[in-house]
Amino acid sequence: MPRTIVAAASGGAATAGAADVACRLAKRFNAHIEGFHVMPDPRQFIVAAGFDVPVTADLINRLVEDGKQIAAKAKAEFERAATRNGLPVDTAGSRNAPSASWREETGYAPTAVADHGRLFDLIVLGRSERIVDQPHTDAIEQTLMRSGRPVLLAPAKAPASLGETIALGWDGSASAVHAMAGSLTLLSAARRVVVITVGKANGASPGAAVVEYLSWHGVAATHRHVLPVQGVGAGELLLASAREDDADLLIMGGYGHAPWREVLFGGATRQVVGSSLLPVLLAH
């Protein structure tokens, strides 16, 4: 059961979806959620800009002020999500009821979120349409690779339901095992679970063994095997199958290099999910 959840709140377009999804999970599982914002260090910006940008006191003050405004926007968005879900926002939290708190740090967001998230059961990151149009993001990759925790990518707009029908993408990899093991609470609470495998049918289906394993944990799952289609990627087939099963959450293993980036951010994937992105829970 997730007892602690951290939601990275950047203050951008993806903040509202991440905050709302995380707060809904906290309410559902009686957990504590922390909204976490990382303000950029002006010195890092100046170093990255090199000598092309003259360093003046006005520039530093402007960067600091911009950072404060973005942080205030992120906090307000998080507090609105907490209020919508009936979560009291304080600094101490509660062991007996769902609660929320806010925290700010200064540094480089991708590594700060990954390192801070290690002591939370679940990390929620926002994922806007602008981000999906990019091949990858440092924040997602760093958090997935460094934190050792499951990472839930929330769409910019929270879905109407979450975790009622779950699609579990299975390829037999260690990452898929970690994703399944790290989400057993979500799987147990779902009304319906579909194990989806993609590939050529060779002998006994690996999905059947996964269904049996889940049954020992009280999860009555079914299995769907998807045969390869020439010219269509496995990620696209997986997402299309999840959509056909009306899944509101996809759980799968994540990779730190090209394969998982393509599954999440490739053009074929964008064609399948359109503008209504499916929440994806990853583990490495």
Image (spheres, helix red, strand yellow):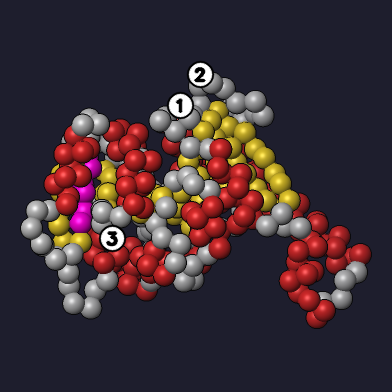
Look at the numbered discs 2 and 1 and tell me whether their residues touch, using CB distance below 8 Å: yes
Quadrant assignment for the N terminus = top left
- The answer to whether residue 213 is left or right of residue 249 is left
Q: Secondary structure at mark 3?
A: helix
Question: What is the three-letter code of the residue carrying label 2?
Answer: Asn
Residue 137 among those drawn in magenta: no
- The answer to whether residue 11 is left or right of residue 243 is right
Q: Residue at x 73, y 51 (%)?
A: 106
Q: CA distance from mark 1 to mark 3?
A: 30 Å
Q: Secondary structure at mark 1?
A: loop
Whether 44 is drawn above or below 118: the answer is below
Residue 25: image location, x then y, percent: 44, 36
Q: Earlier in the sequence, mark 1 or mark 3?
A: 1
Point out which mark residue 239 bears.
3
Q: Which residue is denoted by mark 2 in the rendering?
A: 96
Whether 92 is drawn above or below 7: the answer is above
Q: Residue at x 41, y 70 (%)?
A: 258
Question: What is the three-letter code of the residue carrying label 1?
Answer: Asn
Residue 207: image location, x then y, percent: 17, 50
Residue 193 among those drawn in magenta: yes
Q: Residues within 10 Å of mark 2 (few under 14, many from 20)?
A: few
> Which residues fall within the magenta stretch?
192-197
Q: Secondary structure at mark 2?
A: loop
Q: Which of 225 and 36 lies nearest the eye of the viewer?
A: 225
Q: Which residue is denoted by mark 1 in the rendering?
A: 30
Point out which mark residue 175 bears.
none
State the predominant SS element of the stretch in magenta: strand
Q: Residues within 10 Å of mark 1 (few under 14, many from 20)?
A: some
Q: Earlier in the sequence, mark 2 or mark 1?
A: 1
Residue 189: image location, x then y, percent: 30, 33
